[in-house]
Image (cartoon, rainbow, N blue to C red):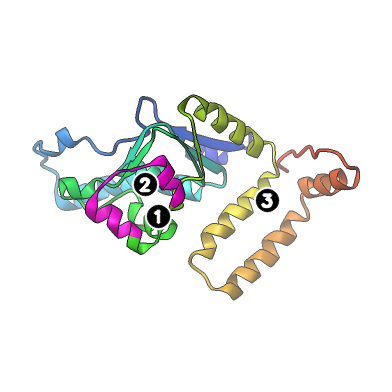
Amino acid sequence: MKEWSRDPEVGAIVVTGAGRAFCAGGDVSAMGKADDATLEQKVDRLRAAQEFSWLLYNSPKVTIAAVNGHAVGAGLGIALSCDLRIASSAAKFGTAYAKVGFGGDFGTTWLLARYAGAPKAKELFFLAENIDAAEAQRIGLVNRVLEPERLMAEAAELASRIAHGPLTSYRYMKANVNLAQSVDFRTMLDREAETHTRCGFTDDHREGVGAFLEKRAAKFTGR
């Protein structure tokens, strides 16, 4: 993720599952095995693993989750850390932490509370019931739901569309929307004044204006 985030040749990042699930969370069978690590060591280990959620959320690239199956526990956090989420109609979403006496990791608490609202987030945590893709879309966790056979083609098309767009603008848009969740209106206006003006100095801005005036499709270069 760090390399892709720095690579100027990468325009968008797609995350999906390698098997039938997107990510079904931790290995429950391993949870009962002896582990001599101290509390502090376990905390440090989890913090290191959770860095993946932060990298997805904070990357200057647009990140897309193509949820091909179950996104549960940590898998839910990983999916929600992405900027856009498209899901197979067969996908399931859930927390599952209460079933094994855990409290939530990989950003699920912060992300669910913001996307679905605190009452719904608490329901999903307390009851630990999976929801289908249609319900996930209804409560704001998913942008689009597609038939399973169309999922990856749609993900590739979406990523390509973004990768060929005004990447500097997208970078500022993403950072600004993320920032807007934690600052006041005046601070956000000041931030927009700066980033909007900076975009005006890019080649892509000049190309976009030229294309509009010439009534043709813009050919952005990411610069």
Magenta residues (range): 120-138
Find the distance from the CA under tag 2 to the CA under tag 1.
Answer: 7 Å
Seen in the image, is 172 located left or right of residue 23? right
- The residue that disc 2 covers is 77
Q: Do tag 2 and tag 3 residues touch (Cβ < 8 Å)?
A: no
Between 50 and 219, the one lying in front of the other is 219
Q: How many discs appear? A: 3
Which circle's residue, 2 or 1, is located before the other in the chain?
2
Q: Which residue reaches farthest left?
A: 34
What residue lies at 50% left-to-right and 30% top-to-bottom? Answer: 151
Residue 181's tag is none
Image coordinates for residue 219, horizontal then vertical, percent? 78, 37
Label 1: element kind: helix
* Farthest right residue in view: 214
Query: Disc 3 marks which residue?
Result: 169
Callout in the foreground (2, 3): 2
Q: Residue at x 57, y 53 (%)?
A: 174
Tell me the residue that label 1 is attached to: 111
Q: Label 1 amino acid?
A: Leu
Does residue 52 show up? no
Answer with the quarter of the image where residue 111 lies: bottom left
For marks 1 and 3, the one nearer the N-term is 1
Q: x%, y% of residue 197?
A: 74, 61
Q: Amino acid at mark 3?
A: Ser
Is there a contact, CB below 8 Å, between mark 2 and mark 1? yes
Residue 153 position, x and y percent, is 56, 27
Disc 2 marks a residue whose amino acid type is Gly
* Horizontal side of residue 163 vs 38, given as left or right: right
